Amino acid sequence: MTIDLATRDSKGMASTATWVKRVGLTLGCCASFLGAAHVADRLSAGEGAPQPVATSAAPAPVVAAAATAPKPAIQPAAAPAPVDPSAYVVKSVLSVNKPFVHGDWYWDESAAPAEKGGKIVVTVDLKAQVLSVFRDGHEIGTAVMIYGADTKPTPLGVFQVSFRKAQHVSSLYGAPMPYTLRLTNDGVAIHGSEAMRPDAATHGCVGVPIAFARKLFGAVALGDTVIVTNGEMLSQGQAIKAA
């Protein structure tokens, strides 16, 4: 499945960057051409006169009517498919009015419903190097992130948070993973990291600034959805797939 989903590029601005992908539906139209033929009656030779006999040398005259073909009906272009009212739609995004670089993050819940408990969806775009968290379709947090190296790539797909621990240490590498939100059975997770540099990489995890990780940990519960893509972007009014 294809999904995506960052709201901005980590090296540029973005409150309403456009994601790449527009779907257009066109319908063709066709019509059959109908023809008609008419065979004329033989002319009578007059009352009491002998009737002419048709022979192979002198066949009875046949008059064919001109065929007329109706013009094909013009079909109107298909209107864009309406957004499914049950879809998880991007209702608002945070305004980031300066270059978004490693170590940067924002958190603002003012546009989201006042009461907590709305559906949380986290999107991760590896190409833009941006993580966004939405509540009820409103972006409440975003950060520049680091991800897996080529030898240990971050997997793409739709995941549910299966484990969360505020003070966690990797059993494989012995490295601290504060505010861990695990995505896969082999340990890929979102967690806080102090190595927020353009040249930094992980063993497949998604690393975010520790202060942001603390905020994210407080908002995300077990079973919440995390969607990881590579270069798919959304804008306000679009539906988040697989959410």
Image (spheres, helix red, strand yellow):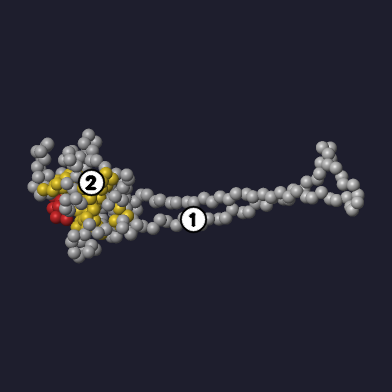
Quadrant into which the N terminus falls: top left
Residue 94 point in image, percent of width and height: 25, 58
Which SS class for mark 2? Answer: strand
Judge whether 222 appears above or below 203 on screen: below
Residue 96 point in image, percent of width and height: 25, 57
For the residue pair 10 and 184, the one nearer the viewer reads as 184
Query: How many callouts does the rendering have?
Result: 2
Crowding at label 2, few (<14), some or many (≥20) Cα neighbours within 10 Å? some
Instruction: Give the residue drawn at x 18%, y 48%.
Output: 161
Which SS class for mark 1? Answer: loop
The residue tagged 2 is 159
Judge whether 229 appears above or below 152 on screen: below
Residue 150 point in image, percent of width and height: 24, 36
Per the model, the C-alpha gap separating discs 1 and 2 is 38 Å
Residue type beneath disc 1: Ala
The residue tagged 1 is 77
Give the side of residue 239 with respect to residue 222, left or right. Answer: right
Residue 61 point in image, percent of width and height: 80, 45
Residue type beneath disc 2: Phe
Crowding at label 1, few (<14), some or many (≥20) Cα neighbours within 10 Å? few
Residue at the far front: name it.
48
